[in-house]
Amino acid sequence: MDAFSFVFTLFGLLMGLALAETIGGFGKALEMRHKIRIGWLLPLLGLLITFDITSLWLIAWQSRSAIPISFISLAAGLVIFGIYYLIAQLAFPDDIEHWPDLDAYYFKHRRWLMGGMYICNLLAMAGEQAIGIPQLANGNQWIVFLAFSAGVAAVCFLPGRRLNMAALIYQLLLYPLFDALGIMSNTWF
């Protein structure tokens, strides 16, 4: 087992559990669809969380040769992916019967969920900088950072369902757009 495989077993476990939590929460909502209004906002936010976890998984893979085996690297991964797990667990309500409209749940929790996701990305950037992978060192990284930050702010602070749906779709489209343009590689987002 190489160094990355050793370190990544912890990261991969937490990321996989976080993905399972988000997808499972959506599954519970679908099961209750005859009793609740699902809407579009919370499913889109759940998809955004899964996209972000997946993108960070890609970044970890791209950074594998620079990730050292140490308590600090394991603790940093535990903090980042532990927060992701908590976000994923909160993405859909456990007591779904008490939330007859999931859009109401979205508006109550969106800032916590998006703020947690943003913090994870900032921590990942700091971690990469700490192991010698420069952050915000070129125009592409700044474009990604500013576009992502603007989307996070929009989701957190825009009022109303339509504006929030537009902000979530914008944020979701950033992932395939930047990947297709080839500027997602070696960036934190």
Image: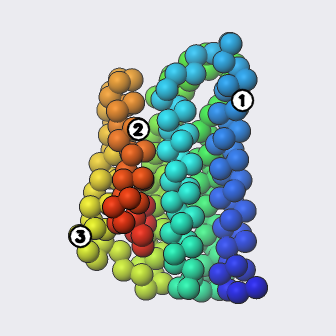
Residue ID at (71%, 39%): 24
Mark 1 highlights which residue?
Answer: 28
Left or right of 181 on screen, residue 133: right
Give the amino acid at mark 2: Leu
Compared with 159, 170 (above or below) is below
Picture coordinates of residue 152 (x, y %)? 37, 46
Is residue 152 something that shows in the picture? Answer: no
Q: Residues within 10 Å of mark 1 (few under 14, many from 20)?
A: some
Point out the tag, 3 or 1, that comes first from the N-terminus: 1
**Is residue 148 toward the left or the right of residue 86 in the image?**
left
Image position of 5 with respect to 172: above or below = below
Q: Is residue 2 left or right of residue 189?
A: right
**Is residue 170 visible in this depiction of the protein?**
yes
Q: Which residue is mark 3?
A: 139
Residue extending farthest front: 180
Q: Residue at x 72, y 62 (%)?
A: 13
Q: Which residue is mark 2?
A: 168
Numbered label attached to residue 161: none
Expressed as whole percent of the image width and height from the top left, the position of residue 158 reads: 32, 32
x%, y% of residue 86?
A: 63, 49
Q: At 55% across and 71% down in the image, what residue appears?
A: 60
Query: Which badge, 2 or 3, comes first in the chain's sequence?
Result: 3
